[in-house]
Amino acid sequence: MVDQNKSQKRQEVKMLNRKLLELTGVINVESFDSEEFLLETELGFLTVKGQNLHMKHLSLEQGLVAIEGLVHSLAYLDGNASTKTKGLFGKLFK
């Protein structure tokens, strides 16, 4: 087994039939709704888009998140996430 240092960044993404997504290395859940999750991970901000998404499991102490629903896409965001967060809130408050 490989010994992990705290300085070493690591993330695992496991998806089963586009209906269950399990992620490690999650630092924070910035925002979420039934169509989009914005997660801060050790490797950057990650958006998960889909339909009927909901959080099955969350443990920020362990860096684990499990999301159920139909997953359409996963994308890491380049640059500042605050502009993306404002865009998501803009969608919510139309």
Image: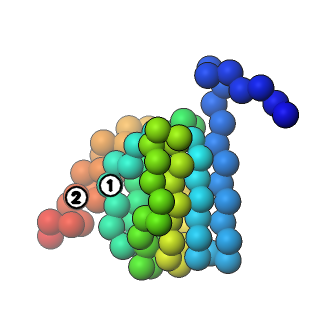
Q: Quadrant of the C terminus?
A: bottom left
Q: Residue 16 vs residue 37: left or right?
A: right
SS at circle 1? strand
In the image, residue 47 lies at what x, y percent? 47, 56
Hey, what amino acid is under mark 2? Phe
Give the class, few, some or many, for how many residues have Cα within 10 Å of label 1's Cα (few <14, many ≥20). Answer: some
Up the image or down, 91 lies above or below 80; here it is below
Residue receiving disc 1: 31
Q: Nearer the N terminus, badge 2 or badge 1?
A: 1
Residue shown at 66%/25% (left/top)?
8
Q: 45 or 20, which lies in front?
A: 20
Residue shown at 32%/55% (left/top)?
31
Q: Are marks 2 and 1 in contact (CB under 8 Å)?
A: yes
Up the image or down, 89 lies above or below 18; here it is above
Give the class, few, some or many, for how many residues have Cα within 10 Å of label 2's Cα (few <14, many ≥20). Answer: few
Residue receiving disc 2: 89
